[in-house]
Image: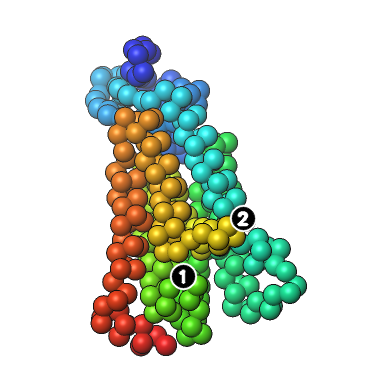
Amino acid sequence: MTQNGHQTSISCCGSEGDFNPFQNPNLRLYDALALSLGGEYEAAEISWSIGWSGNWGRRVIMEMTADRRVRWQTDRLFFTGMALASLLTSVLGFAPTYFVRSSALPPLSPLYHLHGALFTSWIVLFVVQTALVARRRTDIHRRLGVAGVALAFAVFIMGVTVSVETLKRGGGTHIAEPHAFLAIPLGDMITFAVLVAAAVVLRRQTDAHKRLMLLATISVLTAAVARALAQVNAGGPIGLFLGTDIFVLALILYDYKSRGQVHPASMWGGLLIVVFKPLLFAATGTSAWLAFADTLR
């Protein structure tokens, strides 16, 4: 093994009779690499060639270029911090109306209790999943991921259901007319569904996966941001969108600082939050949107 600057180049050769972690069928290739490096490196770009050499059996020659552990350490701090910031935003935003709801307020219906429980569960699961990766317990992380997909589906269905119910009872007027307000939670749910689906498809590309999951979580913080702003007599549609845009900006700046460029998942996922949701809200004055909202009443 030789080290050069911020990269490491490794060549591994072994006969069939030697212990070689790369020959263990129970280990994925990147797990074997982590084992051989003592867990120092988290991810690698790998190229290899396989040939035969007489009685020596199969010989494996591998060259690997990997980021130093510092990349993994900074990612761990950043994504854990963002997960905790998401949880804190949710708690602060919903504290007066959900977590420590005053007895003077009318009781919540079962639908809204279920809605709150599901969305809170998503935020908590995101914090747990981020912590598991930070502690290198990706085995548990992957198992919980299956439950996470089911929870994401439930969050989407409940989010759409509550959006339509709010329209029918004429809610959201503190921000916009009911037909216009509908675009805000529906935009959140559409964005959330697209980002989670992309994260699941790209689950083996860890850098993309964790960014898409973070952005999916950011996309459902809109309601929490709205309530937090209302507590200080601020808000409105612009404040709503800018509140979640700050989280996206933090990811963009982190990418640029740590990588020298913005990761494609951050760029495209961020654009979905920053551009699509305001555009959907802007379309609420069109005849097509009014007709659509009327069909849901």
For the point 46% across and 70% down, the residue is: 175
User: Of the numbered discs in the image, which one, if any, rests on residue 31?
Assistant: none
When asked about the image quadrant of residue 236, the answer is bottom left
The residue at which mark 2 appears reads as: 92
Using the image, determine if residue 168 lies above or below residue 240.
below
Secondary structure beneath dot 2 equals helix
Tell whether 15 sits left or right of 135.
left
Q: Is residue 214 visible?
A: yes
Tell whether 92 sits left or right of 63.
right
Q: Are marks 1 and 2 in contact (CB under 8 Å)?
A: no
- Give how far across and how far down residue 206 sits, in percent: 40, 42
* Residue kind at label 2, given as amino acid type: Leu
- Give how far across and how far down residue 183 sits, in percent: 38, 71
The residue at which mark 1 appears reads as: 175
Using the image, determine if residue 261 lies above or below residue 140.
above
Secondary structure beneath dot 1 equals loop
- Give how far across and how far down residue 143 sits, in percent: 53, 51
Could you give the CA–CA distance between mark 1 and mark 2, rounded to whole angstroms?
19 Å
